[in-house]
Amino acid sequence: MESTAEPSAAAPSAAPPPASSSSSPAAAPNAAVHAATADLLGKLARYAEGEAELSAEDYRLLQAMNLGCAGRYGEMAASAEGLVAFADRLQGQCAELMPQLGRIDAIAQQVHELEGAVGQLDAYSRRLEAKFDALAESAKGKT
């Protein structure tokens, strides 16, 4: 199918601009292309500058976050060192107390054995008292 468009219905940009007396007809389209290219390059440069600035801002933010985290990690490391020193002191104190705890266990065992002996002596003294009372009753009955 062939198009039957009229030649006068062509796009307005297809028509060459009126020529000036000082320039040639070929220079006008060249100047327009040159101006459009310069405009495009300017816009691309602004875009690239914006992207570079965004990247730089991202890196500054990342650096600030890294410095903040490094500070916190330093504080945590100092705290961990303090905890390690405290744990070492506790282990030293525990090692010093172990012999005394052993003695306390031995004394507790001896107390337990003494309580058993006291119980046996108490039971024996009650039996003796009961015998004595029985002998005293029998002596009263004979007299």
Image: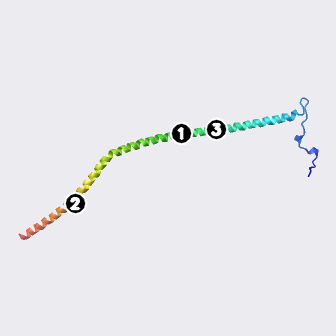
C-beta proximity under 8 Å, tags 2 and 1: no
Q: Is 37 positioned to the left or the right of 16 in the image?
A: left
Q: Which amino acid does label 2 sit on?
A: Gly
Which residue is denoted by mark 2 in the rendering? Answer: 119
Which residue is denoted by mark 1 in the rendering? Answer: 70
> Which residue occupies the extreme bottom position in the image?
141
Q: How crowded is mark 1: few (under 14 residues within 10 Å), some or many (20 or more)?
A: few
Q: Give me the residue at 59% from left, 38% from top.
A: 63
Whole-percent x, y for residue 130 in the image:
15, 66
Q: What element carries label 2?
A: helix
Q: What residue type is labelled 1?
A: Ala
Q: In this view, does 90 lie above or below 121?
A: above
Q: What is the distance, in whole Å, between disc 2 and disc 3 at their CAs?
A: 86 Å
Q: Is 58 positioned to the left or the right of 17 in the image?
A: left
Q: Is 107 positioned to the left or the right of 131 in the image?
A: right
Whole-percent x, y for residue 65 in the image:
57, 40
